[in-house]
Image (tube, grey):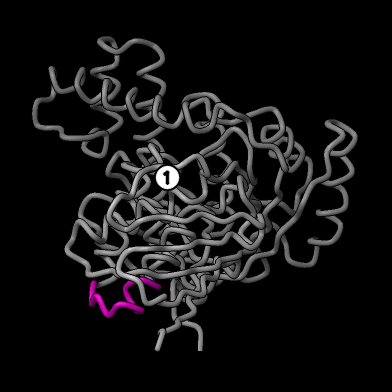
């Protein structure tokens, strides 16, 4: 008799800490109430599998003995997870799975990690693999590196697996130590505004930025041989070593170094309820991403600039890899309706594109659905 399981894994927001995770830095994410749901069952075969993406109405058949990247981009996130679990010795036999979700693709809410983690968690449960969550997180990350070709950091998979209701997480991406912090914002709330654009630069520029950061580390090591990553570089060290860096490399390093400082200060502001300071740090993060890391785009910049005209907005910035997706906005709760209306009207007038607002709740990470 075939066994069946149903699992969900969420997308995530990130209050602050962008492009720091693959530089062994700090991030401040939380899992959200937008999820990927997978229903999986054994099919009685040794090595045949069948996947269906319900939202896309597309299917993919595969052979567990010969897993290779395929033309369907969505399938590679799944097949990569299967292959990474096999590499850990997982005895996976034939299975069929159908999945669907409401994590907006290209939004910066990490639909890809939600997909990877939902399948990792489902396979772990269905086949009684007994891997802990950290093992699944790392397998999902390697799947994206090795099968999809994006050299992502660990934040997205970590958030999808380890999320906790009403808590954000301060994660040290080097040691993997983390702490839960109550996401208690008082009279304020977080609202996402989806630009509904996704520029083609996103994937190629992501890997380019990673290489630029690695170049910066190599050059700074000539002067500071003990550093292993940008995580080890203080702003004082950076300013001393900056003359040896090409301008673009210096800009990339400056963002990562300053962003790590902002994350730690933001976590403290959250703990003490200093929401004005939290908002200032969020704005500073966007300026850095826009000018130093150069991963923003006109649509994102326009939305952030519009918020500066509204005294009930404490902070706004682009969220995610960049070149499209969402802004995250810290606003007064009672102003949400007028905020969404005014921002949508201004965006429509400027770009002729409809804006999609999201009010997200902080929820648990991957779990079996009863």
Q: Residue furthest left?
A: 225
**Spot occupied by residue 344 in the image (x, y as percentages of width and height):** 84, 46
Q: Does residue 324 appear to the left or right of 206 in the view shown?
A: right
In reply to whether residue 109 is colored magenta, the answer given is no
Instruction: Identify the residue position indicated by label 1 in the image.
Output: 262
Q: To which quarter of the image does residue 259 belong?
A: top left
Would you place residue 3 above or below residue 78 in this image? Answer: below
The residue depicted at 63 percent of the width and 37 percent of the height is 324
Q: Which of these two is toward me, 310 or 79?
A: 79
**Spot occupied by residue 255 in the image (x, y as percentages of width and height):** 42, 31
Would you place residue 256 above or below residue 292 in this image? Answer: below
Q: Which of these two is toward me, 253 or 34?
A: 34
Query: Looking at the rendering, in which quadrant would you find the N terminus?
Result: bottom left
**Spot occupied by residue 128 in the image (x, y as percentages of width and height):** 27, 80
**Spot occupied by residue 33 in the image (x, y as percentages of width and height):** 59, 70
Would you place residue 270 above or below residue 259 in this image? Answer: below
Q: Secondary structure at mark 1?
A: helix
The residue depicted at 30 percent of the width and 64 percent of the height is 136
Please state the extent of the stretch shown in magenta in the rendering.
Answer: 122-131
Q: Which of these two is toward me, 68 or 280?
A: 68
Badge 1 density bin: few <14, some 14–19, many ≥20, Cα 10 Å: many
Q: To which quarter of the image does residue 192 belong?
A: bottom right
The residue depicted at 60 percent of the width and 43 percent of the height is 317
């Amino acid at each position: 008799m075939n066994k069946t399981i149903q699992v969900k894994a969420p997308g995530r927001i990130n209050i602050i800490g962008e492009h720091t995770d693959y530089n062994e830095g700090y991030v401040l994410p939380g899992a959200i109430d937008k999820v990927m749901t997978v229903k999986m069952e054994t099919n009685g075969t040794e090595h045949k599998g069948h996947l269906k993406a319900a939202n896309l109405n597309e299917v993919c058949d595969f052979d567990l003995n010969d897993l290779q990247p395929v033309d369907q981009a969505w399938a590679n996130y799944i097949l990569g997870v299967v292959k990474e679990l096999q590499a850990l010795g997982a005895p996976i036999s034939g299975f069929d799975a159908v999945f669907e979700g409401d994590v907006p693709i290209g939004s910066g809410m990490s639909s890809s990690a939600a997909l990877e983690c939902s399948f990792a968690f489902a396979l772990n449960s269905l086949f009684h693999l007994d891997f802990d969550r950290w093992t699944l997180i790392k397998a999902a990350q390697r799947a994206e590196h090795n099968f999809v070709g994006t050299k992502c950091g660990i934040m997205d998979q970590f958030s999808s697996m380890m999320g906790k209701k009403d808590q954000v997480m301060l994660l040290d991406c080097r040691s993997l130590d983390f702490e839960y912090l109550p996401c208690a914002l008082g009279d304020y709330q977080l609202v996402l505004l989806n630009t509904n654009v996704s520029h083609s630069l996103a994937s190629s520029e992501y890997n380019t930025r990673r290489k630029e950061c690695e170049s910066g580390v190599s050059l700074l090591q000539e002067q500071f041989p003990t550093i292993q990553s940008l995580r080890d570089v203080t702003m004082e060290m950076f300013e001393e070593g900056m003359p040896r860096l090409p301008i673009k490399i210096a800009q990339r390093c400056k963002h990562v170094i300053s962003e790590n400082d902002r994350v730690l200060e933001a976590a403290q502001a959250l703990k003490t309820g200093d929401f004005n300071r939290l908002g200032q740090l969020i704005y500073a993060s966007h300026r850095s991403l826009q000018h130093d890391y150069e991963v923003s785009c006109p649509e994102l910049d326009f939305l952030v600039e519009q918020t500066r005209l509204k005294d009930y907005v404490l902070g706004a910035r682009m969220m995610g890899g960049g070149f499209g997706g969402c802004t995250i906005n810290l606003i007064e709760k009672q102003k949400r309706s007028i905020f969404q209306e005014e921002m949508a009207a201004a965006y429509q007038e400027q770009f002729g594109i409809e804006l999609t607002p999201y009010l997200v709740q902080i929820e648990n990470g991957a779990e079996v659905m009863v």
